[in-house]
Image (cartoon, rainbow, N blue to C red):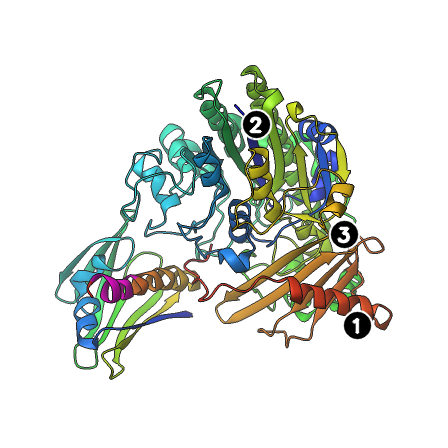
Amino acid sequence: MGRRILFITTDQQRYDTLGCNGGTLGRTPVVDRLAADGIRYERAVPQSVVCMPSRSTMLTGQHQATHGVWMNGVPLPVDAPSVAALLRESGYRTALIGKAHFEPFMDPFERFNENRLATLGTDTLTAPQFGGGVGPHRGFDHLRFATHGATGWLHYAKWIGAEHPESVNDYYAVVDADLEVNAAGFGDTGAPQVKHNPIPRDWYHTDWVAQRTIDWLDGLDAEDDWFCWMSFPDPHHPWDPPQSELHRVPWQDVELPAGYPESAAERERLLDDKPRHWRLWYDGQLVSNYEAPTHWVPASMTADQVREVNAMNAIEVELIDEAIGRVLAEVDRRGWTDTVDVVFTTDHGELQGDFGLLFKGPYHVDGLMRLPLIWRPAPSAAVEPAVVTAPVGLVDLAPTFASIAGLEPSEWMQGQRLPTTDADAAARGIDQQLTAWDSELFGVGVYLRTITRDGWVCSTYLPGAVHDGTEGELYSLAEDPLQQVNRWDDPSVRGIRDDLVAQLRASLPPERTPALELEAPV
Amino acid sequence: MASIRRSQRIAAPAEQVWELVGDPVRLPEWFPGVTEAVVDGDQRTITLGSGIPLPETILTNDPVTRRFQYTVTGGLFRHHLGTIDVFDLGDDTCLVSYSTDAVPDVMALVIGGAAGAGLRAVKQRFEHEES
């Protein structure tokens, strides 16, 4: 019997939405307690700021250049390495409950495994899978999938369609009639992707994910070692929490976020200081990626809409915190608390009003790049609580899970196990993180490579639809925590820029060839 | 309108590859997630893995130029044109191209993305399973 692992992820959650990270809008006492008892990372960085590449990094422990999932819509190969498979081979029971998204969702052909499993109505161990194989899917021998809303092919959608069909349409319609990300708003302010959702809380996907996790844990033997990835679809848009919960954070009382200048002129000045695609998107002249609504112009967003989005987001964060509390109570009831490591993080952030923008895209700033990451080691391991400021990444999770299980990291893993202190990070040379963005949408290509190191975040652009390859961004994280002053062309820091760019180029892993094909929008 | 093209060079004679990809009934043999194709004259109805039926009209089926064109007449499409070309490269290899033009734009990527996987399956079939 070893240490068990409860790996908790959310989707598109900002660093500053947790109380332990200074957030004040939503209450997160459960995760705050994990942070107090464990290690809180102040500079956790994703290797990609969109779902599929980032989640593929978590599973494989590889950069996107290596696992090859360069954008949403590129499926992770079914034979990609998996830390879940590694743990399973060493005797762990393994489960993934909630949002996976290693394969595209938009799949009317129902040709991807994740979309077929619920239709097959089986667990993975005994059922012939699409492609003819038999066995666990990506190393998980129990899978229950959910995503945003109640339509589609996944387990949650089928469950609510069977048990509560009257609530299927309670959710916000994520896409519009053209299958683009919906720009409509059905809250109080007309903010996109907001709706008052009449669904009872018990039927909402956050509580469904928690309950399915509890059910799976209930079925385990007391002596089992287990790895459970509990993956909440929230607080990713749509922002449509149960309307019974809206009283928690009245949007009218929400202070505007520090990253949102209320003056349009100030927003435009800040955007004009950055590479062109920032302002082009703000003005509605360029949509570079599917993840942002095509029919929405960020410049049209009002301050009240920013308030409402932030309020709805905070409500969803609170519901997740309470759901985690239920699961931890079950872990405790089973007598496992002393031997369970809990890791909490997300796949990437959300702009949530910064610079007058929402959602995500090729914008490597803290809204998307600074992640909540908490590791509460099993109390039996007697690891001292700490705060780590060294840059760590989601690429470091897989070797961390291996380490918890007493395994050597596999040769295919590219990160390092998470440091437990800054001294540990320094001793092992953990001092930088890499992030990449590649998107190609109907002829518009955008490509970034970014390094976070020495208190700076430095992005270079490759030639693309609106870039000639000379553009860049350089921000001092200490002096400019909102990344409002782009120092790429500042001669006083030219040496820093040159060093960072050289380090970036020396550190990037080679790109997988041939590149995997984009097979769906998302 | 959006336009998506996927292609594969295949180490097999053009006429052999055309026999497969130019036959409208044989689509389920290589296009992922298509479980059935029923042809009646110039009308084809395919059934997707999700159970969704899609009616189509065959516009071109030219064995001389090895071009197959069709349009989806149901579903969400306001416009659709699918074009499969098989080009003889003269050395017992061929180039297969599958183009999808569609409105809404997103559907071009949904169909075109699956077509790319389909062409990889065709390449696998001719280069590894039938050799």
Question: Quick check: B78 left or right of A450?
Answer: left
Give coordinates of residue A327: x percent, y percent: 56, 24
Contact (CB < 8 A) between labels 1 and 2? Answer: no
| Kind of residue sitting beneath label 2 | Arg
Task: Give the farthest residue toward the right.
Answer: A492
Q: Residues within 10 Å of mark 1 (few under 14, many from 20)?
A: few
Residue underneath mark 2: A3
Mark pair 1, 2: CA separation: 50 Å
Sequence-earlier tag: 3 or 1: 3
- Residue A13 drawn above or below residue B46: above
Seen at 76% across and 70% down, the residue is A498
In the drawing, what numbered circle is on residue B30? none
Asked if one can make out residue A241 in the rendered structure from this viewpoint, the answer is no
Which residue is label 1 attached to?
A: A489
- In this view, the residue in front, A152 or A104, is A104
Q: Residues within 10 Å of mark 2 (few under 14, many from 20)?
A: many
Q: Identify the subunit bearing mark 3.
A: A
What is the chain identity of the residue bearing mark 2? Answer: A
Above or below — where is B106 with respect to A245? below
Residue range corresponding to the magenta coloring: B121-129
